[in-house]
C-alpha cells in the first residue's frame, strides 16, 4: 500500500483485516488501536513510521499486505516493501487528489514493473470528488485509470458503490454491504462507466477487440478477463471508491486485489546471481526449486529479540532447520517460523515460494541478505537506499554513556539502513544523519525509549580552517634557565601560502650547521603540532609551506624539546603577521526540481551565498540545477527544499573545496569562538 501521508492507507488495511476476520473490531488511527501502527511513536504521532506485514485470507487467497509510511522521512520502508511486492494498492485522497508522495512512490513502483489498483479514499468527507480524483490519477500516474465501481452519493451521503460488472448497487450499513438494484437515476452514469470498462478490456486482446467492434459489447466474463489482462500488461489500473473509517467498500478493495493483482506465479521471475560463477539464476515461485529468500525487514522485539522478515522467491523455508546466508557466507540456525496474525504471531511449519514469514534471533542476517540452500548458493539483488539528507550532532547527556549510545545506534541502523552515523574528522563530533527532521526526532526518541539512552542534539559545527595570505620570516626563540641545565632552541622560519588543498609542507634549508641535523625533525614536529590550532578562532591551519633556513643552538642547553617549542612559537608568531584568513567548506550541490519551482530554487540558493554553476534538463518536467554553496548555509537545506517545493524536489551534495569566509561573517565566527573559549575556561 503506497500513498501520501494521511491518505488513509492504514485505515483501509485495518478495515480489510477486520472484514477478513483477523480482528474482531475496526481499529482507529486516531485512537492508536490499529494493528499496523502499534509502535509507541506511531500511536503518539498518528502516522505510520515502519512498514507492517499484514497477512490475511480473502476469497480463498492469501494476501500479504504491506502497509507503508506515507511521509518522505521514512522512504526506506517504502523502498524495501516495493522490492518484495508484486502489486500495489495506490491510495488517493478523494479531496486532495494525487499528492506529492503518492506520485513519487508510484514512480518507484512503476520502475519496478509493479501492477497497481487505485483506492480513492475518504469518499465520505466533504469535498470528495471521485471523478476528479480518478482523472488526476490517470494524468499524474501515467496509467489509464478505469473505475470498476462507482460511488453512490458522496460526502455524508456516500453510502455504497455500484458494481459495474454485475450492475448491482452495494449499500452499506454498519460496515456490512447488501446488494440491490441501483436507482434508476444512475442508469446513464452506470452505462457510461460500464462502457469504459468494456473498452479497456477489449484493448487487451485482439479477439476481444474484434468482438467489441463487431457486436458493441462483451460478456461480463470477457470484461473481467480482458481487464485483468490489461492490468497485468500495465495498460490500465482499476479504481475503487472507498471510505475506510466508515468501512464502506473496503471489501471491494480486497476483491480488486484478488481480481487484478498478480499472484507470485504470474509475476516476472526474479533473477539472482550464482555465488560460484558469473551466470544468473532465474527464480520462479516453485516450491520444488531450491530455497532462495530475501530479507527485507528487521526489527527489535523486546520479548523475542531481533525479528527478521523475509520473502521466499523459490523453494520452501522450514522451521527448525539450517539455512545459508549467501551474502555473508555464514550458516544460520532457523528456529520457529511465524506469520503475523493481528498483534500476535502464529507458528507455522513452512513458508512456501511466494509467501512471507518472520523468524527470530538470527545472529548475522540483516536487511538485503539472501537466505538459500547451501547446495545452490545465490544472491538476490538487494536494496538501493538514498543517502541521508539531514544531520545533527549528538552527545550523551550522561558522561560515560558513549559506548551505550554507539551500541544503540548500531541496533537502530540494522532496522533502518537510511540512518547514518559518522564522526566528523575535523570537529570530532558524532553526527546522526537521516531523511528529515521527523526521522531524526523518531531516532532520538527510540534511543531513549528502547535503549534508555538520553542524548543531546545540536546543529553540527562547521569545520572551518585557517591559512595565511602573505609570506613572512620570523624567529622562534625559546630560552629557559632554571638553575641547572637550561633549555635553548632558536629557529628562523619562512612561512608562505600554498594553493588551496595543498595542506602543509616543510622544507629544510639550513646550511652550515646553524641548527644541528638531530634537532631539525623536532622543529618540524613543533610546526606540525602548531598547525592544529590557528590564531584567529583556533581552527586548524592549512595550505602553508614552512621553510627552516637558519637558527642557533647551545652545546649544553639545546634539546629536541626546546627546538620543538621554538618551531611552534615561530609558526604562531608568523601566522599572526601573515594576514591570517578564515576558510569555510564549499559544497557542490545538485538539485532536481520541477520546472515551476526553478526561479524559487535559484533565488534561494543565491540568498545562501551560492553560485549557480549550470542548469540542464532532468527527468520529464524537471530541471537539474548545479551550484556551489557554503556548508554553513545548508545544514537544513533538505527541510527548506521540501517546504519550498511541496516535497517534489530532491538534492544531493558533496564536499568541493575550501574558500575564504567574507570579512563580516568571519568576524562573527571569530567572536563566537572567543566567547566559547572564555566559557570553557570558566
Image (cartoon, rainbow, N blue to C red):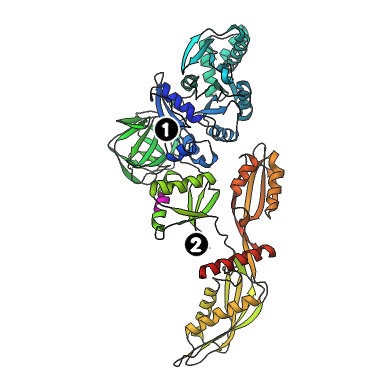
The quadrant where residue 90 appears? top right
**Residue 582, image x and y in percent?**
63, 66
Report the magenta residues as a range.
Answer: 406-410
Work out whether residue 501 can be spotted: no
**Residue 682, image x and y in percent?**
51, 70
Q: Nearer the viewer, residue 323 or 153?
A: 153
Q: Principal SS element in the magenta part?
A: helix
Give the residue displayed 55% in from the left and 76% down from the top: 527
Q: Nearer the viewer, residue 552 or 636?
A: 636
The residue beneath circle 2 is 428
* Image-based side of 535 in relation to 333, left or right: right
Question: For mark 2, does the 10 Å Cα neighbourhood hold few (<14), some (14 to 19), or many (20 or more) residues?
Answer: few
Q: Does 409 appear in magenta?
A: yes
Q: Earlier in the sequence, mark 1 or mark 2?
A: 1
Give the alpha-carbon distance from disc 1 to disc 2, as whole Å. Answer: 40 Å
Q: Nearer the viewer, residue 78 or 330?
A: 78
Give the residue displayed 39% in from the left and 60% down from the top: 400
Q: Does 246 appear in magenta?
A: no
Question: For mark 1, does the 10 Å Cα neighbourhood hold few (<14), some (14 to 19), or many (20 or more) residues?
Answer: many
Work out whether residue 257 can be spotted: yes
Dot 2 falls on a residue whose secondary structure is loop
The residue beneath circle 1 is 53
Give the residue displayed 64% in from the left and 75% down from the top: 496
The reply to whether the C-beta atoms of the residues labelled 1 and 2 are less than 8 Å apart is no
Amino acid at each position: 500500500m503506497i500513498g501520501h501521508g494521511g491518505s488513509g492507507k492504514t485505515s483501509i488495511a485495518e478495515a480489510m483485516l477486520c472484514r477478513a476476520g483477523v480482528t474482531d473490531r475496526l481499529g482507529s488511527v486516531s485512537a492508536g488501536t490499529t494493528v499496523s501502527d502499534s509502535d509507541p511513536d506511531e500511536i503518539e504521532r498518528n502516522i505510520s513510521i515502519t512498514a507492517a506485514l499484514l497477512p490475511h485470507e480473502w476469497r480463498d487467497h492469501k494476501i500479504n499486505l504491506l502497509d507503508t509510511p506515507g511521509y518522505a522521512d521514512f522512504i526506506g520502508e517504502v523502498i524495501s516493501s516495493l522490492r518484495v511486492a508484486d502489486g500495489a494498492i495506490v491510495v488517493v485522497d478523494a479531496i486532495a487528489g494525487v499528492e506529492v508522495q503518492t506520485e513519487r512512490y508510484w514512480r518507484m513502483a512503476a520502475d519496478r514493473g509493479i501492477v497497481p489498483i487505485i483506492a480513492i479514499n475518504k469518499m465520505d468527507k466533504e469535498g470528495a470528488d471521485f471523478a476528479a480524483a480518478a482523472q488526476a490519477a490517470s494524468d499524474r500516474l501515467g496509467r489509464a485509470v478505469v473505475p470498476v465501481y462507482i460511488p453512490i452519493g458522496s460526502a455524508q451521503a456516500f453510502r455504497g458503490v455500484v458494481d459495474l460488472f454485475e450492475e448491482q448497487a452495494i449499500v452499506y450499513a454498519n460496515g456490512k454491504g447488501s446488494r440491490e438494484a441501483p436507482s434508476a437515476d444512475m442508469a446513464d452514469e452506470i452505462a457510461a462507466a460500464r462502457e469504459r470498462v468494456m473498452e479497456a478490456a477489449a484493448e487487451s486482446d485482439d479477439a476481444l477487440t474484434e468482438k467489441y467492434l463487431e457486436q458493441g459489447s462483451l460478456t461480463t466474463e470477457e470484461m473481467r478477463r480482458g481487464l485483468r489482462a490489461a492490468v497485468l500488461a500495465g495498460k490500465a489500473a482499476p479504481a475503487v471508491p472507498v471510505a475506510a473509517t466508515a468501512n464502506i467498500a473496503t471489501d471491494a478493495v480486497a476483491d480488486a486485489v484478488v481480481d487484478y493483482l498478480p499472484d507470485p506465479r504470474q509475476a516476472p521471475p526474479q533473477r539472482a546471481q550464482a555465488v560460484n560463477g558469473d551466470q544468473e539464476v532465474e527464480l520462479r515461485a516453485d516450491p520444488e526449486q531450491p530455497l532462495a529468500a530475501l530479507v527485507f525487514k528487521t526489527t527489535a522485539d523486546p520479548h523475542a529479540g531481533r525479528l527478521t522478515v523475509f520473502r521466499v522467491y523459490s523453494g520452501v523455508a522450514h522451521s527448525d532447520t539450517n539455512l545459508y546466508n549467501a551474502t555473508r557466507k555464514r550458516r544460520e540456525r532457523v528456529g520457529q517460523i511465524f506469520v503475523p496474525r493481528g498483534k500476535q504471531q502464529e507458528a507455522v511449519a513452512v513458508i512456501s515460494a511466494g509467501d512471507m514469514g518472520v523468524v527470530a534471533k538470527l545472529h548475522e542476517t540483516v536487511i538485503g541478505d539472501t537466505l538459500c540452500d547451501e547446495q545452490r548458493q545465490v544472491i538476490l539483488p538487494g536494496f538501493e537506499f538514498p543517502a541521508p539528507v539531514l544531520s545533527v550532532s549528538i552527545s550523551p547527556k550522561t558522561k560515560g554513556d558513549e559506548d551505550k549510545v554507539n551500541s544503540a545506534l548500531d541496533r537502530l541502523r540494522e532496522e533502518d539502513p537510511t540512518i547514518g552515523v559518522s564522526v566528523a574528522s575535523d570537529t570530532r563530533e558524532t553526527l546522526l544523519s537521516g531523511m528529515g527532521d521527523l526521522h531524526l526526532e523518531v531516532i532520538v526518541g527510540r534511543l531513549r525509549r528502547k535503549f534508555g539512552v538520553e542524548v543531546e542534539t545540536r546543529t553540527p559545527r562547521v569545520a572551518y580552517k585557517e591559512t595565511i595570505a602573505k609570506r613572512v620570516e620570523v624567529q622562534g626563540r625559546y630560552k629557559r634557565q632554571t638553575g641547572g641545565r637550561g633549555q635553548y632552541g632558536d629557529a628562523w622560519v619562512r612561512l608562505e601560502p600554498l594553493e588551496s588543498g595543498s595542506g602543509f609542507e616543510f622544507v629544510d634549508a639550513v646550511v652550515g650547521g646553524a641548527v644541528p641535523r638531530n634537532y631539525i625533525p623536532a622543529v618540524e614536529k613543533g610546526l606540525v603540532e602548531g598547525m592544529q590550532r590557528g590564531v584567529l578562532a583556533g581552527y586548524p591551519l592549512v595550505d602553508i609551506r614552512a621553510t627552516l633556513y637558519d637558527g642557533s643552538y647551545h652545546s649544553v642547553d639545546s634539546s629536541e624539546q626546546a627546538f620543538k617549542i621554538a618551531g611552534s612559537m615561530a609558526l604562531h608568531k608568523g601566522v599572526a603577521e601573515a594576514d591570517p584568513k578564515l576558510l569555510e567548506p564549499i559544497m557542490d550541490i545538485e538539485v532536481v526540481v520541477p520546472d515551476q519551482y526553478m526561479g524559487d530554487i535559484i533565488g534561494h540558493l543565491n540568498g545562501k551565498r551560492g553560485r549557480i554553476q549550470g542548469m540542464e534538463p532532468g527527468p520529464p518536467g524537471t530541471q537539474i540545477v548545479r551550484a556551489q554553496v557554503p556548508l554553513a548555509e545548508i545544514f537544513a537545506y533538505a527541510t527548506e527544499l521540501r517546504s519550498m517545493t511541496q516535497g517534489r524536489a530532491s538534492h544531493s551534495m558533496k564536499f568541493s573545496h575550501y574558500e575564504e569566509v567574507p570579512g563580516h561573517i568571519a568576524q562573527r565566527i571569530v567572536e563566537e569562538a572567543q566567547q566559547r573559549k572564555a566559557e570553557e575556561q570558566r
